[in-house]
Amino acid sequence: MILEVLTYPDKRLYEKSLEVTEFDEKLHKFLDDMYETMIAKKGIGLAAIQVGVPKRVLLVNLANEDGIQDKADLLEIINPEILSSDGEICYEEGCLSVPEFFEEVTRPEFIKLKFQDRFGKVCQLDANGLKAVCIQHEIDHLNGHLFIEKISFKNKKRFSKEYKEKLKKQ
């Protein structure tokens, strides 16, 4: 089922998400619905709060070398915790909750992540490059933050002006 994606300035996007404690069929159905939604909206990542559910759940599904978003590469990340980070990378980010706006954001290039899978099993993952950027972007959502908070003052002013104009046209 395709879920509705909340868009800025919806106040729910600033809500801090709660830890998942039940790893049941309801969670599995929700993960499947999140995946369908992310693919339908042409995203590479999605946090549960973006579909109005304040749970510490996120998905990341990057395209492979052939440019295909293969479900076999899907990361279902529940209750994530960044154990360490290193380096620095600047990447042009976008967001399904801030449609049609892209801006350079600087984040750590390498992360070590601890999380649970859909069955509650504790896992660890080392990520770098776009995968690390995407995971950090989605974790920001779980903590009630949007990528536009990380951009420069000048670019925030530009964003605010462009976004208000876009909303007027709708």
Image (cartoon, grey):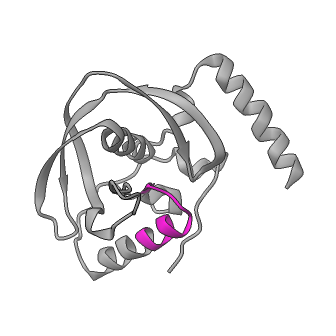
Query: Magenta stretch: residue 40 in it?
Result: yes
**Quadrant of image for the C terminus:** bottom right
Quarter where residue 27 is shown: bottom left
At x 48%, y 64%, the residue is: 38
x 17%, y 70%: residue: 119
Where is 124 relative to 148, above or below?
A: below
- Seen as rendered, the residue at the extreme right is 169
Q: Residue at x 66, y 26 (%)?
A: 156
Q: Horizontal and vertical percent for residue 106?
A: 43, 25
The image position of residue 69, as x and y in percent, is 39, 63
Give the tally of numbered discs: 0
Residue 156 vs 33, above or below: the answer is: above
Q: Is residue 132 left or right of residue 49?
A: left
Q: Point out residue 147 in the picture as x, y percentages from the top left corner.
A: 52, 36
Q: Is residue 163 left or right of residue 89?
A: right
- The magenta segment is 35-46
Asked whether 1 or 130 is in front, the reply is: 130
Residue 87 is inside the magenta segment: no
Relative side of 168 to 118, left or right: right
**Residue 145 at x, y percent in the picture:** 49, 38
Residue 121 falls in image quadrant: bottom left
Relative height, residue 81 to residue 70 (above, below): above
**Foreground: 129 or 162?**
129
Q: Residue at x 74, y 32 (%)?
A: 160
Which of the two residues, 20 or 170, is positioned nearer the viewer here? Answer: 170
In the orientation shown, which residue stands out farthest toward the front?
66
